[in-house]
Image: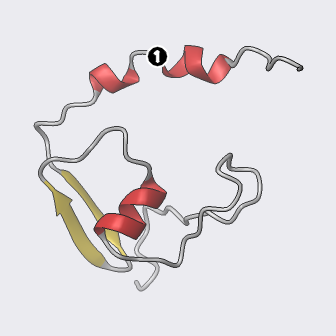
Amino acid sequence: MPTMAPSSVRDETDGLLQQFDTKQPLVFFVNGKKVSDDSPDPECTLLVYLREKLRLCGTKLGCAEGGCGACTVMVSKVDRKT
């Protein structure tokens, strides 16, 4: 059985979880509505958060690796309505 190559992503992200301050609320806007979470799970993906916490099921889990684009979410700093 072939072995997988070591991932450089793991090296780049080691220690990030410890830097996440769970005492600060997570505040963002989804479809123009403000969302605030006082106890966000730092291990929860955006896809899972949208689907399970906000019950927004438009984003789909496809390949579970990010290659197919099914889980694509548009992220913008600009309110497109203005």
For the point 33% across and 79% down, the residue is: 32
* Quadrant of the rendering where the C terminus is positioned: bottom left
- From what the image shows, is residue 22 above or below residue 19? below
In this rendering, is residue 68 above or below 35?
A: above
Which residue is drawn at the image coordinates 76% and 51% (left, top)?
A: 67
Q: Where is residue 45 in the image (x, y as percent from the top left)?
A: 44, 49
User: In x, y percent, where is residue 79?
Assistant: 40, 74
Whether residue 30 sits left or right of residue 3 in the image: it is left
Residue 62: quadrant of the picture: bottom right
Q: Which residue is drawn at 46% across and 16% down?
A: 14
Q: In this view, does 51 lie to the left or right of 21?
A: right
Q: In this view, does 42 lie above or below 77?
A: above
Q: Mark 1 points at which residue?
A: 14
Q: Kindly identify the residue that appears in the image at 23 percent across and 67 percent down.
A: 35
Which secondary structure lies at badge 1? loop
Image label count? 1
Q: Where, quadrant-wise, is the N terminus in this rendering?
A: top right
Amino acid on which the number 1 mark rests in the picture: Asp
Residue at the extreme bottom of the image, as rendered: 81
Residue 80 relative to residue 20: left or right: right
Considering every residue shown, the one lying at the far right of the view is 2
Check the image and tell me how it is coloured: secondary structure
Seen from the viewer's position, the closer of residues 82 and 19 is 19
Q: Residues within 10 Å of mark 1 (few under 14, many from 20)?
A: few
Quadrant hosting residue 78: bottom left
Up-down relation of residue 2 to residue 20 (above or below): above
